[in-house]
Image (cartoon, helix red, strand yellow):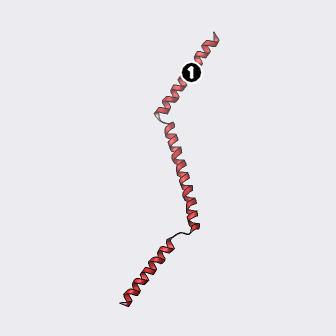
Amino acid sequence: MRLYLAVAALMLVLATHAEAQEEPTIEQHFANFHSKIKEFGSDLTDKTMATFKEIEQSEFATKTRNWFSEQFEKMKQKIDETFTN
């Protein structure tokens, strides 16, 4: 019976020791935090750039740019007609 208790106690000590070794130190937490923030920032940058490119190439943006260009050309023509006469 003592052997079973000794083995159970030894297993408990080994399990506790293994869990204690897996916990990172404060220094490791800060190093991980820094890398996670850097990774988050680059991911956010990539996603933002992709979104802006998608918006820029969308049909709505293209039609809007064309409409403004047409309106600007019409306005230039009107001004040229008005001031040349």
Q: Is residue 22 left or right of residue 79?
A: left
- Residue at the bottom extreme, as displayed: 2
Question: Tag 1, which secondary structure?
Answer: helix
Q: Residue at x 51, y 25 (%)?
A: 67
> Quarter holding the N terminus?
bottom left
Query: Viewer-proximal residue, 8 or 66?
Result: 8
- Residue at the left extreme, as displayed: 1
In the image, residue 51 sits, relative to residue 5, either above or below, namely: above
Q: Position of residue 39 (x, y in %)?
A: 54, 55
Q: Residue at x 44, y 77 (%)?
A: 15
Q: Specify the quadrant of the image occupied by residue 74.
A: top right
Q: Position of residue 72 (x, y in %)?
A: 57, 23
Q: Residue at x 54, y 22 (%)?
A: 71
Q: Residue at x 64, y 13 (%)?
A: 83
Q: Amino acid at mark 1?
A: Glu
Tally of numbered discs: 1
Q: Position of residue 68 (x, y in %)?
A: 54, 26
Q: Position of residue 47 (x, y in %)?
A: 51, 47
Query: Viewer-proximal residue, 19 or 48?
Result: 19
In the image, residue 68 sits, relative to residue 1, either above or below, namely: above
Query: Viewer-proximal residue, 7 or 45?
Result: 7
**What residue is disc 1 on?**
73
Label 1: few (<14), some or many (≥20) within 10 Å? Answer: few
